Image: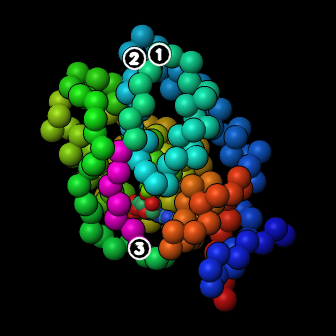
Amino acid sequence: MKKLQVKDKTFAISIPAEELQKEVQRVAAEINRDMEGKEPLFLPVLNGAFIFAADLLREITVPCEVCFIKLASYAGTQTTGTVREVIGLATDITNRHVVIVEDIIDSGLTMAHMIETLTAHNPASISVCSCLVKPDALKVDVDIKYRCKNIPNDFIVGYGLDYDGFGRNTKDIYTLCEE
Ligand code: IMP
Ligand code: MG
């Protein structure tokens, strides 16, 4: 089993790159089908979504725009429950078909806040596209239109996701090992 050491914690491979890429292609095909003629505006959420967004966007074939935004709410291995403001929204989203691109939805609080904030700008539609979802951790109801994979309620790193800032730079995804 491939292992990864990130700071004081050990992780073991749980989703290999090839498996992820297949799911990314499937999701991109769904978006290409749904967004035909709609000129979607993709809003990847930094920092975590940078790798997923880069892979996903290279599979998108409909004319589109991309604007990276930020809204952080996480520290260490537990969600803090506190959410901050959306920053970086440089493009007017009024009457646009917006696709929020996230790395992972855990409690769903970050995404719920994001949707609420963006809705105030009157977009034509808002779709959520998350690489990963932890269905058992969801605390609020979020409509997740596109997702690559559901995962168990474990802490993971890699493919953009971090532990305390480290571990984002891997092609595979790793799950925290029980001590
Ligand atoms: P939520 O608000 O609880 O849904 O948390 C969402 C954010 O927490 C994500 O955008 C990630 O940045 C972070 N997060 C949630 N679960 C994990 C994990 O297992 N590893 C690393 N980051 C995570
Ligand atoms: Mg994130």
- Earlier residue among tags 2 and 1: 2
Q: Is residue 145 visible?
A: yes
Instruction: Residue at 34%, 65% (x, y): give it.
Output: 73
Q: Nearer the viewer, residue 136 or 22?
A: 22
Identify which residue is drawn at 29% across, 23% down: 96
Badge 3 element: strand
Q: Which residues are magenta?
A: 69-75
Mark 3, ligand 1, within 8 Å: the answer is: no
Residue under pointer 2? 39
Q: Is residue 18 left or right of residue 167?
A: right
Residue reaching furthest top?
37
Give the position of the N terminus as an image quadrant: bottom right
Q: Is residue 173 magenta?
A: no
Residue 67 sits in which quadrant?
top left
**Gap between marks 3 and 2, in whole Å?**
35 Å
At numbered mark 1, what does the secondary structure look like: helix, strand or loop?
loop
Q: Is 62 situated above or below 144? A: above
Q: Are marks 2 and 1 in contact (CB under 8 Å)?
A: yes
The location of residue 56, given as percent across then percent down, is 58, 35
Which residue occupies the foreground of this view, 26 or 72?
72
According to the image, label 3 marks what residue?
75
The vertical placement of 118 against 96, above or below, is below
Q: Which residue is mark 1?
A: 63
- Give the amino acid at mark 3: Ala
